[in-house]
Image (cartoon, rainbow, N blue to C red):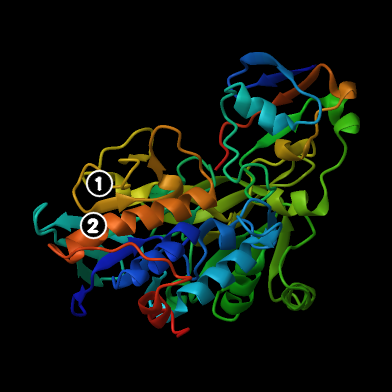
Amino acid sequence: MSESIKTDVVIVGAGPAGLFAVFELGLLDIKAHLIDILPKPGGQCAELYPEKPIYDIPGFAKLSGQELVDALLRQIEPFHPTFHYGEMVESLEVLGSADAPLFRIRADGGQSFECKAVIVAAGGGSFQPKKPPVPGIEAYEGKSVFYAVRKIEDFRGKHVVIVGGGDSALDWTLNLQPVAKHLTLVHRRDEFRGAPHSVKAMRELVTAGRMELRLGQISSLKGEAGELASVTVKDASGGSHEIPCQRLIPFFGLTMKLGPVAEWGLNLHENLVPVDAGTFETNVPSIFAIGDINHYPGKLKLILCGFHEGALAAQKIYHYVYPGKRLTFQYTTSSSSLQKKLGVN
Amino acid sequence: MVKITYIDSSGEARTIEAQEGSTVMEAAIRNGIPEIAAECGGGCACATCHVYVGEKWVALTGKASDQEEDMLDFAYKVQPNSRLCCQIKVTPELDGLTVTTPDRQG
């Protein structure tokens, strides 16, 4: 395991609220690391609606999700935040006290962090793969059913069935076809969302008889002791086909699950974290929650509220990071010291 | 107001009055209809407001757009009458509409 990273603040979630918190902390000389389960910054903005216009970002009549994320990344550049993508925070341990807070955070990749304050900016929770509601699928997960491909060798010489019509399904179809004994791609219709060249390559393999494409939906699984033997595919006309299958990889996109946040000793109110509306601190001193994941009287799940919450949380965090030091409120328009931090002066 | 009936996966029916111009998803959320998650809030970006449109309403509610079809790939047990109800606008012609919700959205 790598050495523990020591920093001022760990921000859990690199969505708009988490990104802007870096800015507000940075102005107060507070360093931050961000951890996100997605392989990229932006959270829901980047994952759910990168191309959809947002109309209620103050000062911007219209901005797409991705444009907002890109602008925030540019804005926080002067503070050099460190991003840890593709990592889910697994545990949060309280090591210190309210007077001298210290936390240890572990990510599922094995990296650990020690910090004086935590900002939970996890939105609706972590994005996790959707599991198709095929009866009994849980019994095969991790052994025969995979929602992501980590080791190609696991699929060598096997009957592989991939379900889906997007880039993940097509990319893995093309990558696993050479190693699999036999590969079947199952999709509900004969149209694919994936990149046209991947679709073309897949169709060529089908024509050459090197893989199979089946239109339909998985309805049941057969196997024993976690080892899958076959899956049944129902086609649009109601016909059922049983096909041999030792490895099943369903790609049904991502869904948000609260995940391990529930285990961190924070009070929860209907899967949200109650906070003080003046500081956005949770019931645990020096753990803060901002953005869609928090709850307080009058809460609105708006990006602009997440920005406000980050700014106020940073004020309180300052006193945990620099105990006993006075904090003078300053404006970026007039303060030369803030402008220096931003690299504009 | 336009009457819409939501039938849940156990067969229980709930009829509500929806406002013209809203969507079948918004009307469901406002009235606490179960089995409609609407994770993305109506952006046609998540497939968690999947419904089956009552057979006689299929022509009136129309076909799913290409983008909606793409999102339906993420839904389960998709049928020819599957729609994402955030994409169905409430119009006076839909008075009496019935939709059925699947047992799982995501």
Q: Position of residue A332 (x, y in %)?
A: 45, 70
Amino acid found under the numbered disc labelled 1: Glu
**Disc 2 to disc 1, how far (Cα)?**
8 Å
Q: Secondary structure at mark 2?
A: strand
Give residue A171's position: percent from left, percent from top: 62, 74
Checking the image for residue A263, the label placed there is 1
| Residue A91 disc label | 2
Identify the element where label 1 is drawn: helix
Image x and y of residue B52, in percent: 73, 31
Which image quadrant is residue A298 in?
Answer: top left
Q: Classify residue B96 as left or right of residue A24.
A: right
**Position of residue A195 measured from the top left corner of the image (x, y, whole percent):** 73, 72
Q: Is residue A272 left or right of residue A255?
A: left
Confirm whether circles 2 and 1 share one chain.
yes
Chain under numbered label 2: A
Comparing A271 with A230, the one in front is A271
Residue at position x 79%, y 25% in the image: B54
> Which quadrant is the C terminus of chain A positioned in?
bottom left
What is the three-letter code of the residue carrying label 2?
Ser
Mark 2 or mark 1: whose residue is earlier in sequence: 2
Compare residues A206 and B48 and report the one nearer the observer.
Answer: B48
> Can you see residue A47?
yes
Residue drawn 29% across the image and 65% down it: A10
Tell me the quadrant of the picture where the N terminus of chain A can be found. Answer: bottom left
Residue plotted at (19% across, 65% down): A321
Instruction: Name the one closer to the observer, A111 or A62.
Output: A62
